[in-house]
Amino acid sequence: PEKTLYAVKLAGVYDLLLESERATHLIAHLKERDAQNAEVLNETGNAFYRYKYFAHAKDCYQRAIRLVPTESVYHSNLGLALRELNDLPAARAAFQQAVYLRPFNSVNHNDLGNLLYLQKEEALAIAAYR
């Protein structure tokens, strides 16, 4: 009976491991799908931005960020749209997040520096450009 009980427990652990593996696979699949959807949203936002539909572009970038918050280009693009909408504090926060996510990306630093200069914060702008 002890061996049988052990075998039943072992089988239960095996079932849990299989479920865990399936869950891990499902999560990976969902993350991949989110990344693909986020890229489509980003590209849609870029199209809106090109045609000066900045509010629509902003919405697309925000939705992309909700799906993949670690992609700096989405934050940078959001900052550009917000700057065009004259929401400078929110644009600044978006650019700062882009710099935080990719600190060695010169475009992110340039975008932040340009905004800081626009806000008459020359010393901070110079520091951002470096």
Image: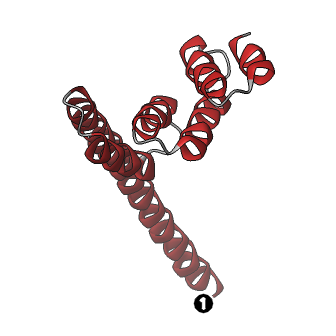
Q: Is residue 59 left or right of residue 73?
A: left
Crowd class of label 1 (few under 14; some 14 to 19; many from 20; radius 10 Å): few
Image coords of residue 63 (percent x, y): 36, 51
Q: Is residue 9 left or right of residue 29?
A: right
Q: Which is more toward the observer, 29 or 116?
A: 116
Identified at 44% across, 31% down, the residue is: 80
Q: Is residue 34 left or right of residue 2?
A: left
Asked which colour scheme the image uses, the reply is: secondary structure
Q: Which is more toward the observer, 105 or 24?
A: 105
Q: Residue furthest front?
A: 120
Q: Which is more toward the observer, 16 or 97?
A: 97
Identified at 36% across, 45% down, the residue is: 58
Identified at 57% across, 79% down, the residue is: 9
What element does badge 1 sit on?
loop
In the rendered image, the vertical position of residue 122 relative to residue 25, given as above or below: above
Image coords of residue 55 (percent x, y): 31, 47
Image coords of residue 35 (percent x, y): 35, 40
Screen quadrant of the C terminus: top right
In the rendered image, the vertical position of residue 60 relative to residue 125, given as above or below: below
Q: Which residue is mark 1?
A: 1
Q: Which is more toward the observer, 16 or 50?
A: 50
- Count every numbered label the image shows and give the total: 1
Three-letter code, disc 1: Pro
Image coords of residue 61 (percent x, y): 37, 43
In the rendered image, the vertical position of residue 103 relative to residue 71, given as above or below: above
Q: Quadrant of residue 129?
A: top right
Screen quadrant of the N terminus: bottom right
Q: Residue furthest bottom?
A: 1
In the rendered image, the vertical position of residue 24 relative to residue 125, given as above or below: below
Identified at 23% across, 26% down, the residue is: 50
